[in-house]
Amino acid sequence: LNKPLLIVEGEKKTFCANIYNKGAITVGVGGVNNFTTVYDKSSGESQVIKELDSLIPLKGRKVLIGYDNDIQINESIQKAENGLVNLL
């Protein structure tokens, strides 16, 4: 739990982060909304994908999110990041 988790979007960012950022565990998602799965279809409630939650202990770990540079102006990226934050 002493290494933070960095979640990025896209394979290229994941590759670069793994090369240049040795102080964190880096996980890439294939799109800004691909961190969840709907587990209750009637309510629409989501949870973090099981691969992320089961392979990397999240409780007590610092989590950093590094999505696209245009997050300041792109509402869909803002919404996706806020959704991830709320699930964590």
Image: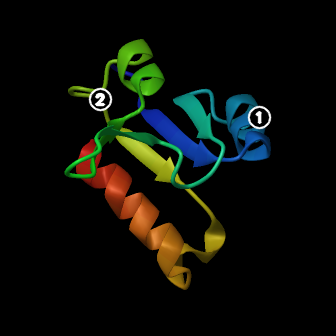
Q: Residue at x 42, y 60 (%)?
A: 81
| Left or right placement of residue 67 versus residue 43 in this view | right
Q: Calculate the distance from the C-alpha at mark 1 to the C-alpha at mark 2.
A: 22 Å
Element under disc 1: helix
Residue 53: % across, % down? 36, 24
Residue situated furthest top in the rendering: 55
Q: Quadrant of the C terminus?
A: top left
| Quadrant assignment, res 55 | top left
* Viewer-proximal residue among 48 and 19: 48
Residue located beneath label 2 in the image: 61
Residue 37: % across, % down? 41, 39
Label 2 sits on what residue type?
Arg
Q: Quadrant of the N terminus?
A: top left
Label 1 sits on what residue type?
Phe
Give the crowd class for mark 1: few <14, some 14-19, many >=20 residues within 10 Å: some
Colour convention: rainbow
Q: Residue at x 55, y 85 (%)?
A: 73
Q: Residue at x 54, y 73 (%)?
A: 71
Residue 5: % across, % down? 45, 32
Mark linked to residue 53: none
Residue 10: % across, % down? 71, 46
Q: Is residue 80 above or below residue 44?
A: below
Mark linked to residue 15: 1
* Viewer-proximal residue among 13 and 19: 13
Residue situated furthest front in the rendering: 42
| Left or right placement of residue 7 versus residue 17 in this view | left
Q: Is residue 18 above or below residue 54?
A: below
| Quadrant assignment, res 63 | top left
Element under disc 2: loop
